[in-house]
Amino acid sequence: MTTRSRCLALVLLALPLLACGRPVGNLPFSGEGTKTTTMPLAAGNVAFWTNLDVAYEGAATLGYRIELSQAGRTVAMVDCDLLENLSLKLGWLATNYGAVHSTVGHAKMQCVASLPTGGPTVVKATLAFGTRPAKANLKHADLVLKQ
């Protein structure tokens, strides 16, 4: 493969990543709970990603409930699934041995919020198991916002 062919291949591989937006902030989670921070967000769509490392036994669902507020009022609210229906995965490794599951990697979730105006935005996110597994080891499940 020539140098030119390799460069073209790298550009083509990078195009989907460029279309995903740039990171504007994150909320680190090392377990279930609620985190709040303020970020400068622009008007338009906000995409939500996760950086996840979890192992569990049995059936499970895991999700974020995200509320975006500006000037004291809620402007968007979304629910995001961390384990299913992910639109783009990077460095993603999911293993399933019977009832034992392990997932690690970075992925874009299908949930999207739309902001009518830009400016300082309070991001309140709650991470929780919907269906609680028999056993779980949640090392991290960081929420990443991109625009």
Image: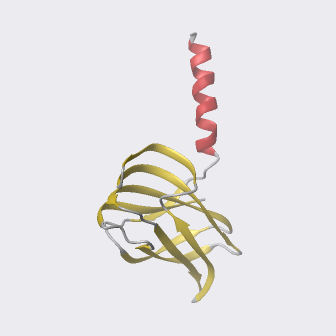
Q: How many marks?
A: 0
Q: Is residue 42 left or right of residue 145?
A: right
Question: Who's the residue at 65% across and 72% down the image?
Answer: 118
Q: Quadrant of residue 11?
A: top right
Image coords of residue 142 (percent x, y): 40, 62
Between 103 and 132, the one lying in front of the other is 132
Question: Who's the residue at 59% across and 68% down the image?
Answer: 41
Q: Is residue 98 left or right of residue 63?
A: left
In this picture the colour scheme is secondary structure
Whether residue 124 is situated above or below residue 44 in the rendered picture: below
Image coords of residue 72 (percent x, y): 57, 89
Q: Which quadrant, please, contains the C terminus?
A: bottom right
Tell which residue pokes out farthest to the front in this image: 98
Between 55 and 12, the one lying in front of the other is 55
Tell which residue pokes out farthest to the bottom in this image: 72
Q: Which quadrant, please, contains the N terminus?
A: top right
Tell which residue pokes out farthest to the top in this image: 2
Image coords of residue 43 (percent x, y): 68, 69
Question: Who's the residue at 59% across and 82% down the image?
Answer: 70
Question: Who's the residue at 32% across and 69% down the image?
Answer: 31
